[in-house]
Image (cartoon, rainbow, N blue to C red):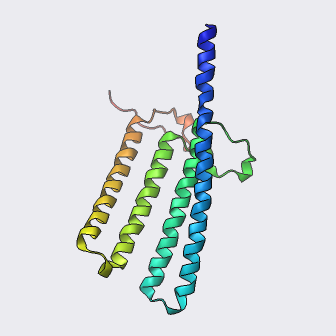
Amino acid sequence: MRFENGLERFLFNSRWLLAPFYVGLVLALALLLYHFVVEFFHFAVMIPRATEREVILGILALIDLSFTANLVLIVIFSGYENFVSKMEIKDHDRPDWMTKVDFGGLKQKLMTSIVAISAIEVLKGFMNIEKFDTDRLAWLVGIHGVFLGSLLIVVIADRISEPMKHPAETASGRARRKPHK
């Protein structure tokens, strides 16, 4: 019994080995911010002589970086809270989604962000179509389709595996239908 308790305590505390990964992601977020600032500076400098298409492509590049930063932040907060420890911060400073995102929600948010990033890449390809060969554009569209399909599968799988809740447990007070066994 004593050995079992020690082993369980050791295994439980091993979750802290994930903390350096999240610190590394924070540093990667700082590097992404640096890249965003550099891109923004290049974009701002070229604005006076830019065509409408170049402006749109520049804005899409900044949006792409912003979506990627959001994705990293979601992984940092949700991963840390779900797998390491709850963050002891004031409730008013806490984004609402932090207390509501479980592992299934994290998967959906990640896939949604990846689909959004992929959609921007496809849009950039179409906006810059004269510089893209048809094979590369087809690959972009195909990969985007795979990401969309993957998101759909994740959502359906989570919906099917979601435990049935009593009406008092649901936010709206409505009961979910029980699946037939």
Residue at 43% from the left image edge and 57% from the top image edge: 114
Q: Horizontal placement of 84 versus 166: left or right?
A: right
Between 145 and 20, the one nearer to me in the picture: 20
Q: Is residue 5 above or below residue 151?
A: above
Could you tell me residue 7's position as x and y percent?
Answer: 59, 17
Task: Give the farthest residue toward the bottom.
Answer: 49
Residue 100 seen from this side: no
In the displayed structure, 67 sits above or below 44; it is above
Please say whether residue 3 is visible from this viewpoint. yes
In the rendered image, the residue lying farthest to the left is 135
Furthest residue in direction top, as rendered: 1
Left or right: 170 as drawn, with respect to 130:
right
Residue located at (47% from left, 73% from top) = 60
Nearest to the observer: residue 158 or residue 76: 76
The quarter of the picture where the N terminus appears is top right
Image quarter (top left, top right, bottom left or bottom right) of the C terminus: top left
Vertical comparison of 6 with 57: above or below: above
Looking at the image, residue 153 lies above or below residue 133: above
Residue name at image x 63 percent, y 27 percent: 13
Residue at (59% x, 58% y) in the render: 29
Q: Nearer the viewer, residue 171 or 119?
A: 119
Q: For residue 140, which quarter of the picture? A: bottom left
